[in-house]
């Protein structure tokens, strides 16, 4: 296979028109030949910048070297040393701002497609039934992990590898957290990818108890005092949705992205065989510009709606991954940028009939460094719609912090924890992921899960 | 999986289950709810807790079989399992945290409508255990649909059964009975707790506003996760947006925007109807529901 060293080996994707009407995965990934060709573009830098850009410090040049040689098993073993969820990360990490953003190859040409290679290796290992290595020695100490999302799974996996007896407590009926309820099937297949990665974590000896809401079914104090857990890691995520507080938000047909995506992803409402209903809109307006907004928009589109993204800043400021925006556009999603909703209009029965918006322009930079959007006076207009999905970010759930004595939170209700080791203000309790940082990415949560595992091991080894 | 240790029919289409759920049984209090799923593809259904036995580790739920999912539950029997059973969710009733001294001085009237009798029962029972005998109006459309009367009598002060059609007990709406008790029969109440269909709670609140009795209602809007995540259950209470699952389910009834809450209940009506039709007609379903495209 011929390779232009300046360009990524293109990855096969489902045709945009076809996929806009189904929930199958968009990106089809590399085959062996393509993966080896792409791997040959790696310069194998001595001072590898890509590794510094990876929140879990995967030894990237080493695993790519093995891919180049065609030794995929060895490549998987190298990735597994650092990551419990490579098939997930290869699909949803914002590589352009992490590993690939630092790639030396990328200075003159396109960076090495590290994400796609990681995904290839993980999928290959899964297909060939290769599992991560189990701990050889037992520590004889119990650790509880709260939440089975990326932070919890990573922390649990690392602790199990060290020999701890780990139980994950999950509030929903299925493990996976945001990987299951938040990210759609067409971006992250649930049975083929997420369930398999969770099986891998379980194969390390991790137990998962679903349907347990910590703070309600039991508390952290009870876990430590009555159930014999020596340490606890909180990876409960940022689950509470935000609304705009504009008139008409209680109308029928207005949903949080959380609700809309949970119905479709966790409850599989997109599937005719699911008992859970979901609104199949004619014209949907999604408010927001992050990855979750893209996910909600592309879901609404697949359920048959003409779909608009309404975002108050310009394209440059869209917080979503470049690939998601690109895919969304290809599929026919309409971007109404520099536009902000001011009111949701409803018909006489209380159903959404439209969204009154105002045009925005960019003014001076604000504290975030981005130019502040300012309303253009008198520029109001109406977008007809029967469905509005609010995707404005999420904040941590106070269920745990409010029921745990001595656990400090900041003014955003995020748990205060040390970035280095996840240590909170309560002895033996560690935390990481969105519960600490507020809504962020899968890989940052995994990095925090790793740090937490290290912190807990240090604490229990004292 | 959560084992059903006792199953019985309380009335036509109203079924009762004792379910093994030790974590829930150990920590629940009156006013809280659980979410159950019957099987792998099942909907998450929120149900207010009807009773619990901490020693046996069981929780009692009562279900009215009206939707596609709940209709399937009618077939469950002793020894069967619920796929999922999570809780306790929501806040306990306010009086669980009240000072017992002052609570014992209060005269409380419960207004239970239809299936709402089930969540009223653990509250009256809990109060009785603290030495407070509350009065209860149990309302139903007709005699056959009136549930838990004997159980309630065992723990309440006075019980006033009421049927819309007059087939049993007092005749007419629960609001008439409530008014009669206060205005004609010399009863005095400091607090009213009303649990039942939203339309009933709305009218009880209008009545108690007139009678100047502070009133608590238990809201049962559409929910998905029940932990504050989806926001489907949002209500307007005193002009503020509240989530029934974490801020409630009990609220000051005089401040709830019932008209809005009732409008929000119909969001999935068509879809639910469609699911029901599909289930009833199975493979023989060829349209007519207006949703499936079969009649286009």
Image (cartoon, grey):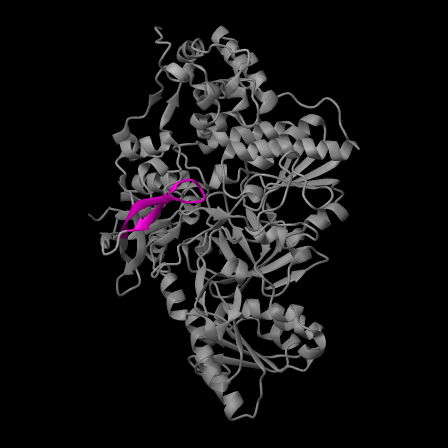
From the viewer's perspective, tell me whether residue B151 is left or right of residue B271.
right
Viewer-side residue, A201 vs A458: A458
Residue B96 seen in the current view = yes
Position of residue B131 relative to residue A370, above or below, is below
Q: Above or below — where is A179 with respect to B292?
A: above
Q: Position of residue B38 (x, y in %)?
A: 51, 49
Q: Is residue A208 magenta?
A: no
Q: Looking at the picture, does residue B149 appear above or below residue A456?
A: below
* Residue B283, percent from left and from top: 33, 44
Residue A445 place in picture, x, y as percent: 55, 35
Q: Residue at x 60, y 37 (%)?
A: A152
What percent of the width, then of the height, locates residue A285? 30, 48
Inspect this view and state whether residue A226 appears. no
Q: Residue at x 52, y 9 (%)?
A: A71
**Which corner quadrant of the image does residue A133 belong to?**
top right
State the residue in front, B91 or A275.
Answer: B91
Query: Extreme right residue here?
Result: A462
Residue situated in front as seen by the camera: A383 or A169: A383
Q: How many numbered marks does the figure carry? A: 0
Farthest front residue in view: A364
What are the residue bounds of the magenta stretch? Answer: A358-375
In front: B229, or B127?
A: B229
Where on the picture, by quarter, is residue A345?
bottom left
> Overall secondary structure of the magenta stretch?
strand
The N terminus of chain B appears in which quarter of the rendering? top right
- The answer to whether residue B226 is above or below residue A45 is below
């Amino acid at each position: 296979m011929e390779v232009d060293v300046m360009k990524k080996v293109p990855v096969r994707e489902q045709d945009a028109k076809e996929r806009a009407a189904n929930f199958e995965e968009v990106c089809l990934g590399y085959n062996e030949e393509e993966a080896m060709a792409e791997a040959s573009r790696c310069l194998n830098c001595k001072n590898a910048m890509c590794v510094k850009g990876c929140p879990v410090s995967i030894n990237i040049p080493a695993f790519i070297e093995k891919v180049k040689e065609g030794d995929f098993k060895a490549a998987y073993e190298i990735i597994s040393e650092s990551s419990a969820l490579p098939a997930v990360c290869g699909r949803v990490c914002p590589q352009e701002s992490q590993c690939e953003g630092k790639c030396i190859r990328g200075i003159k040409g396109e960076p090495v497609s590290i994400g796609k290679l990681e995904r290839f290796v993980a999928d290959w290992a899964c297909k060939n039934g290769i599992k991560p290595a189990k701990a050889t020695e037992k520590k004889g100490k119990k650790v509880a992990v709260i939440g089975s999302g990326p932070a919890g799974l990573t922390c649990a996996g690392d602790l199990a590898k060290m020999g701890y007896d780990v139980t994950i407590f999950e509030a929903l009926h299925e493990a996976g957290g945001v990987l299951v309820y938040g990210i759609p099937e067409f971006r992250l297949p649930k049975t083929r990818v997420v369930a398999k990665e969770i099986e891998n974590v379980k194969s390390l000896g991790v137990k998962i108890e679903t349907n347990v809401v910590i703070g309600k079914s039991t508390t952290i104090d009870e876990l430590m005092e009555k159930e014999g857990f020596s340490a606890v890691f909180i990876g409960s995520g940022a689950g509470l949705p935000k609304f705009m507080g504009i008139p008409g938000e209680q109308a029928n047909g207005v949903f949080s992205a959380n609700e809309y995506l949970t119905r479709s992803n966790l409850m599989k409402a997109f599937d005719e065989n699911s008992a859970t209903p979901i609104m199949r809109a004619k014209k949907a307006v999604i408010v927001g510009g992050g990855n979750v907004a893209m996910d909600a928009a592309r879901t609404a589109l697949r359920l048959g709606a003409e779909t608009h993204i309404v975002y108050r800043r310009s394209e440059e400021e869209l917080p979503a991954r470049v690939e998601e925006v690109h895919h969304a556009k290809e599929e026919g999603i309409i971007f109404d940028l520099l536009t902000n909703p001011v009111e949701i209009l409803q018909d006489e029965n209380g159903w959404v009939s439209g969204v009154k918006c105002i045009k925005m322009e960019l003014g001076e930079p604000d504290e975030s460094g981005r130019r502040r959007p300012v309303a253009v006076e008198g520029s109001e207009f109406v977008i007809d719609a029967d469905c509005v999905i609010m995707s404005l970010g999420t904040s941590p759930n106070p269920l745990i912090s409010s029921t745990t004595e001595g656990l400090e939170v900041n003014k955003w209700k995020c748990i205060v924890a040390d970035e280095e080791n996840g240590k909170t203000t309560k002895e033996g309790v560690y935390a990481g992921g969105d519960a600490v940082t507020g809504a962020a990415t899968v890989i940052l949560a995994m990095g925090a899960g790793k740090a937490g595992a290290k912190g807990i091991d240090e604490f229990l080894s004292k | 999986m959560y084992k059903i240790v006792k199953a019985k029919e309380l009335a036509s289409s109203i079924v009762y289950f004792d379910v093994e759920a030790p974590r829930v049984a150990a920590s629940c209090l009156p006013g809280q709810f659980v979410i159950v799923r019957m099987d792998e593809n099942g909907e998450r259904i929120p149900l207010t807790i009807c009773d619990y036995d901490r020693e046996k580790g069981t929780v009692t739920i009562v279900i009215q079989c009206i939707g596609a999912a709940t209709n399937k539950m009618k077939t469950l029997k002793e020894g069967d399992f619920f796929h999922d059973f999570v809780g306790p969710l929501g806040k306990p009733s306010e009086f669980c945290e009240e000072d017992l001294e002052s609570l014992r001085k209060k005269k409380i009237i419960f207004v239970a409508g239809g299936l709402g009798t089930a969540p009223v029962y653990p509250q009256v029972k809990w109060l009785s255990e603290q030495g407070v005998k509350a009065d209860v109006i149990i309302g139903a459309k007709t005699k056959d649909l009136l549930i838990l009367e004997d159980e309630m009598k065992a723990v309440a002060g006075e019980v006033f059964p009421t049927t819309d059609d007059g087939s049993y007990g007092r005749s007419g709406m629960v609001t008439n009975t409530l008014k009669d008790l206060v205005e004609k029969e010399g009863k005095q109440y400091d607090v009213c707790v009303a649990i039942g269909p939203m339309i009933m709670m709305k009218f009880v609140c209008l009545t108690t506003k007139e009678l100047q009795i502070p009133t608590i209602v238990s809201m049962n809007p559409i929910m998905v996760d029940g932990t504050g995540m989806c926001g489907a259950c949002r209500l307007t209470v005193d002009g503020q947006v509240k989530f029934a699952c974490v801020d409630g389910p009990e609220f000051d009834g005089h401040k709830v925007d019932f008209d809005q809450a009732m409008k929000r209940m119909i969001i999935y009506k068509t879809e639910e109807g469609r699911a029901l039709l599909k289930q009833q007609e199975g493979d023989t379903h060829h349209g007519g529901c207006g949703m499936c495209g079969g009649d286009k």
